[in-house]
Image (tube, rainbow, N blue to C red):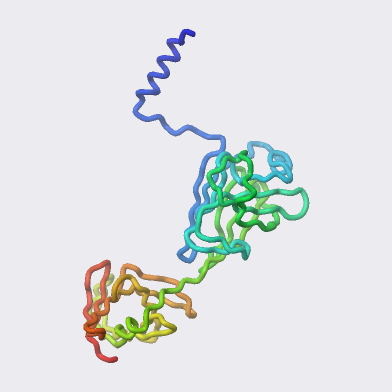
Amino acid sequence: MKSSPLLAAAAALLLFAPGAPAQPRGSERSTMTQIVNGTTLTLDFARPVARGRENLFGGVIHWGETWTPGANWATTLEVDRPILVEGHRVEPGKYSVWLQPREDGFWTFLLNGQWRLYHDSPFPADDVVLTFPVFPEQGAHMEALNWYVEAISSRTATLRMHWGPTFVELDIETEPYTWDPLPAAERASYLGSYAFDTNDPTTGGPMRLTVTVLEEDGRIVGRWGRGAIALVPAGPAEFMIGFLRNGDLFDVADEMTLRILVENGVSTGAEFLWEGEVFGIGEKVGR
């Protein structure tokens, strides 16, 4: 069969073009990432568009169908720490996300351990890691399907899937942070009070304080002024500064560390570091 000169010319242009621009897709791919209490949640999904179709659920998406809430490749959820989804534990990892809509009553939410799946692939039922009922609600019209996070608090958030007037909400809860305990002999070598007279690395103003290092439930904690801090291990005899509220670790300043100087199993002094550089030397003033 003879090839068309026009087609051949077009093919040559494509082969030698410096770079073709991105082309529109009917359901464009999107990624949504949020960090809640140090836990990163990432949703990767395609956004089908209503385009005048009013009967999205029960029409475009059949009742009882096992559907990935998106299009093309399956929607995925990835988390880097354990979370609770509607009270159900989800381990760190990447999962494909599915819904089974029903005309009446609850829908079913599913997470599957196989995540590289096409939307119309046979559903691998043996790899379901989590399933529970959810209840659809009605609200404002959302032309393109979207996943988004709202109502974020210190440890919780609400994850919502919304298409047309219909949305499904999922309550997300993250685990409280803690820090690693240390062996008794190592803990004992760090205990003491250390007096610093230096300058604040962020403001340049004077920074005079005494840090007292204590042990509590096998972990190292510190006190300066009236506040308690967590000393979160960052390396041999070096600790990141963690801030506590009601006993929970809610903020770790990894740019600032406390290094305790130890000789023959006994502390002799301490250093404050900012981004790896020493900015204050503390004299040991008490056990």
Q: Could you say where residue 137 lies in the image, as x and y percent from the top left?
A: 70, 54
- Extreme residue toward the right, this view: 104
Tell me if I can see residue 224 in this picture: no
Q: How many marks?
A: 0
Compare residues 207 and 188 and report the one nearer the observer. Answer: 188
**Residue occupying image coordinates x 55% and y 52%:** 95
Q: Residue furthest bottom?
A: 286
Q: Is residue 50 above or below residue 177?
A: above
Q: Position of residue 40 (x, y in %)?
A: 47, 59
Quarter of image, res 283 = bottom left
Q: Residue pushed farthest front? A: 126
Quadrant, the C terminus: bottom left
**Residue 70: percent from left, percent from top:** 59, 44
Figure check: 1 above or below 181: above
- In this rendering, the answer to whether 87 lies above or below 99 is below
Decide which of 213, 274 is in the foreground and name it.
213
- Residue 171 location, x and y as percent? 61, 62
